[in-house]
Image: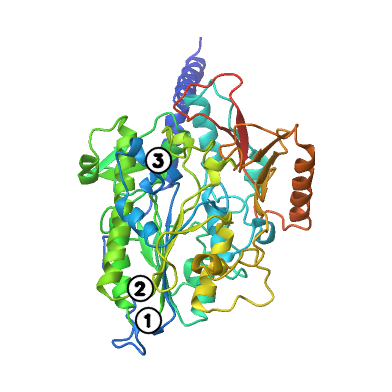
Amino acid sequence: MKRWQKAVLGTAAVIAVLGGAAWVWRTDVALAFVRWRSTVDVAENRPVPWQQGPEQAAMPAAERPPNIVFILFDDLGTNDLSTFGGGVAGGRVPTPNIDKLAAEGAIFTQAYAGNATCSPSRAQLMTGRYATRTGFEFTPTPPGFARVVTMVSADVSPDRPPIEYKAEADAVAPAFEDQGLPPEEVTVAEVLKGRGYHTVHIGKWHLGSAPQFHPNAQGFDESLNLDGMLHLPEDHPDAVNAKIGFDAIDRFLWASAHFVTSYNGGEKFAPGGYLADYWTDESLKVIEANRNRPFFLYLAHWGVHSPLQATRADYDAVGDIGPHRLRVYGAMVRALDRSVGRIMAKLEAEGLADNTLVVISSDNGAPGYIGLDALNAPYRGGKGTFFEGGIRVPLFARWPARIAAQSRVALPVGQVDIMPTLAAAAGASLPKGVTIDGRDLLPALTGKGTPPRADAPLFWNSGYYKAVRAGDWKLQVNERQGKAWLHNLAADPTEQVNLADSAPRQRAALEVLLAAHHAGRKPPLYPSTFDTPVPIDKTLAEPYRRGDEMVYWPN
């Protein structure tokens, strides 16, 4: 054999070996590429130059329009709060500050997120409009997310129905930063700003990162934005991390995440501590800076969204809970409860508590992919499903000047109702020429009457998966699976008995409502790039068995 032939064969052998190794370790190679692509320059922490309000108030706090503080948690399940008699790890992690706020105001006993994933919910609560009007139907995902998560999932969960990557849709999807809430949509911040409010956003936005979608372009005077996905640096001495090896999303997040923030779209810099505490520190500064004028503070916490990270102090405080990821999760809930307590204490200290409307909610139910059971108990399903566990969320409102303590509102309500309700509380006018789907819930909160369109149905949609609740009846339809679920929530609040085939009259009536809701709808602004099979009654930590009931979720 000639020398050149040997060289060719040797090169081919090396390529074959490298190719084989790359295939064997394809998940690690893909995640390493994600880590390389995700590199960002992060400056050191610096003080946030919050705008300072007037030194003297033009009128007493009680005579001004109410301050409004809206606190949104991320992926928090209804059973994570001891308010409802539950709490993490069978009640071992109480939430006394949140419980106290709820007891001092109103609890909506049948409250729903706008969607079963984060971004569409946030778009709804910002605009008071359904995705069928805005087109903001799918959660924006970072570059490579759909392809890599599909690959990693096939490796770590080979026995499960696969996540299906839509290469053609991914190829035509806009860039991640260009997937956002259209600038022509009018947000609650814009409405309140028109009433003279100083408007501040702190935390997660996830409604687009290009300048035209930024909070500053959507009505917020100031924004301290989540630009990474870590609660603390991974190697921080005070960080307790819980990595979830069986979850492809978690693997992607750890590979791509950073500990970074920015103020008003400027240079990216490191936050000044564990996110829940840092954002609370900055919220207290905002309250103090604006104590003499009406303000709207939208505090959108990243907790308890994965990657799961807690401080060492909180991890030690919750005690010996297992498994490790549950203990970290409980510690994260503890940090959120502390945040609420500190904000309420600051409002009291500044003499603002009586005439401040504080609203608390979560963007959707807890996800099964982190492998923790009972976070949405007693409801079935979780994030990525329209079962009650995926969309039933806490919703509390405290405003001593107008809302009586120990109030209960039994009316089914959705986050689509938040924007018009906050506008009504502020005495602000809704935008002219814009159809608002949400209702003003202030009459129910204050006991002064019945909200307009009190019997209006609630709708949810994500591509081929749709749901409607009218009265006590709720219908889910998954067109991809050719399947429907119908439940009477008064008789069956945990959706155990599917009446889709045995109650044809009720099903037909709800199908008519769904058809009318989708008639003339605005198409999605960008496509879904993958389809995910989501177990209804199991977490990802439990073994898959043939016949397990699942629902497919687009994107």
Q: Which residue is mark 3?
A: 255
Q: Assess disc 2: are there few (<14), some (14-19) or many (≥20) residues with their C-alpha within 10 Å of its C-alpha.
A: some
Q: Which residue is mark 2?
A: 354
| Residue depicted at x 53% and y 59% | 207
Sequence order check, earlier mark of 1 and 2 = 1
Q: Position of residue 117 (x, y in %)?
A: 54, 47
The image's mark for residue 62 is 1
Q: Position of residue 529 (x, y in %)?
A: 62, 42
Q: Dividing the picture into quarters, in which one does residue 525 lie?
A: bottom right
| Callout 2 amino acid | Asp
| Callout 1 amino acid | Ala
Q: State which mark lies toward you, 3 or 1.
A: 1
Q: Who is closer to the viewer here, 143 or 422?
A: 422
Sequence order check, earlier mark of 3 and 2 = 3
Q: Dividing the picture into quarters, in which one does residue 403 lie?
A: bottom left
Would you say residue 297 is visible in this rendering?
no
| Residue depicted at x 55% and y 58% | 415
Q: State which mark lies toward you, 3 or 2.
A: 2
Q: Dividing the picture into quarters, in which one does residue 59 lie?
A: bottom left
Q: Position of residue 374 (x, y in %)?
A: 43, 35
Q: Assess disc 3: are there few (<14), some (14-19) or many (≥20) residues with their C-alpha within 10 Å of its C-alpha.
A: some
Q: Who is closer to the viewer here, 342 or 84?
A: 84
Q: Position of residue 361 (x, y in %)?
A: 45, 55
- Label 3 and label 2: CA atoms lie apart by 45 Å
Q: Assess disc 1: are there few (<14), some (14-19) or many (≥20) residues with their C-alpha within 10 Å of its C-alpha.
A: some
Q: Secondary structure at mark 3?
A: helix
Position of 231 with respect to 37 (left or right) is: left
